[in-house]
Amino acid sequence: MDKKLGNILIVDDDEDILLAAKMLLKRHAQKVIIEKNPKKIPFLLNHDSYDVILLDMNFVEDTTTGKEGIFWLKEIIQRDPQAVVIMITAYGGVELAVEALKEGATDFVLKPWQNEKLIATISAAAQLNSSRKEVTTLKQAKQTLVRDLEQPFGDMLGESAGMRNVKAIIQKVAKTDANVLILGENGTGKELVARALHKQSSRASKDFIGVDMGAIAETLFESELFGHKKGAFTDAKEDRIGRFEIANKGSLFLDEIGNLPLNLQAKLLAVLQNREVIPLGASRAVPIDIRLICATNMPIDDMIAQKEFRQDLLYRINTVEVYLPPLRERGEDIPLLARHFLQSYAKKYKRPEKKLSAAALTRLQQYHWPGNVRELQHAIERTVIMSDEALIQPDDFFFLSQKQSTEGDQLNTLNLDEMEKTVIEKALQKYNGNISKAARELGLTRASLYRRLEKYGI
């Protein structure tokens, strides 16, 4: 049987009543606790939680006033304002029932009860308790969201000149509907900037939808972004809403826009110009109202000169440009970021609080961080997991030394992953972060290279 009633506590001075109720309810509840002495109620509440409490109104022989029951009801409600309490008595009356309800009781039943009616009453009370918990959870989630919204830059930590400039631009641009293009290397935090723009915009209460343009197969581009109708192509077994429609009235973040092939750039441009999409297989256009935010780590101006990116599309997406500096250009932010990640991962992995020694901090600041903030984040996470000491020392970042030693022409490791990562880093350095050129040099597709960048935290 599905035990829907949860944990039930029954407090009554009549042992026969307790046993009869337990025999009836144990088939429907996960656990039934019975107690004759009401003075044990505080102890019971401190050591367990109950979905429903059945409480007798009278515990002294020949007493029918219900005052004892009201007293213990108040005690329960004081300890747990969300408690669901059903009062039970052999001496019912409208005035007594009204008083119990005023003091916080959920319902009132008479002895002797009908089994079906008692179960129905407890079921309704258990559902009420569940609803109260859901409301409490939603309130807490809303409070958390509000707190997040009140922190306009979230995890965008940094007080360097470059980061102060980024935050200043965000504050100026966010309230407008201007399209924004975020430029920066992999791992610099372009999505954080996009989310900050959304959170401070007039569309903050609507959806923020992110799309990794480099991860969408060319054949699925229109379906993913614009949607499709059932039967539009072989695998279209049902209607699908595209990302543009989902983001309607909100913000759409197109990450790695530089990876979009030319033929698809033309389709995207048409959508942005017309402010409407036509799902595959549909005959009617769907109007869209979005705030567009794009990002790329590629040199867009060079791509335009090489006819790899449409200039008219660039005009559409970069009303305002935001440049995110690489971590090597904002070394003064490394201590703040490192301590933030130390605290976050110690909490995540339930480890004792750790601190960075001066020497360890120096090592972090001397490293060039080709993977930027993302690489620093992964380095701190790994150290929190592997280090047993409360004070982090330079040797705890031994893998950074290994990376630095491989910057020359010689590879001093036979580990295939390390070798592959080093070669990828060299290719990116050679082409100044141009993913297309680096992928071509490595003999990889852009999608394959992106998977490896994610794998190695580059």
Image (cartoon, helix red, strand yellow):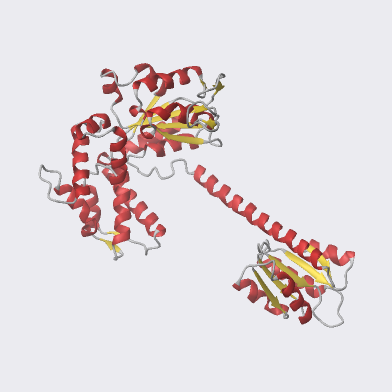
Image height check: is 281 above or below 441? above
The answer to whether 446 appears left or right of 78 in the picture is left
- Seen as rendered, the residue at the extreme bottom is 61
Quadrant containing the C terminus is top left
- Residue nearer the viewer, 340 or 131: 131
x and y percentages locating residue 357 in the rendered image: 26, 59
The answer to whether 417 appears left or right of 321 in the picture is left
Quadrant containing the N terminus is bottom right
The answer to whether 445 appears left or right of 64 in the picture is left
- Residue nearer the viewer, 5 or 44: 5
- Residue nearer the viewer, 424 or 444: 444
- Seen as rendered, the residue at the extreme left is 410
Image height check: is 316 above or below 138? above
Q: Which residue: 39% across, 42% down?
A: 156
x and y percentages locating residue 183 in the rendered image: 33, 31
Q: How many marks?
A: 0
Image height check: is 447 above or below 373? above
Say whether residue 261 is visible: yes
Say whether residue 105 is visible: no
Q: Which residue: 14% across, 49% down?
A: 405
x and y percentages locating residue 172 in the rendered image: 44, 30
Residue 130 falls in image quadrant = bottom right
Q: Which residue: 74% across, 59% down?
A: 124
x and y percentages locating residue 257 in the rendered image: 37, 28
- Residue nearer the viewer, 315 or 51: 51
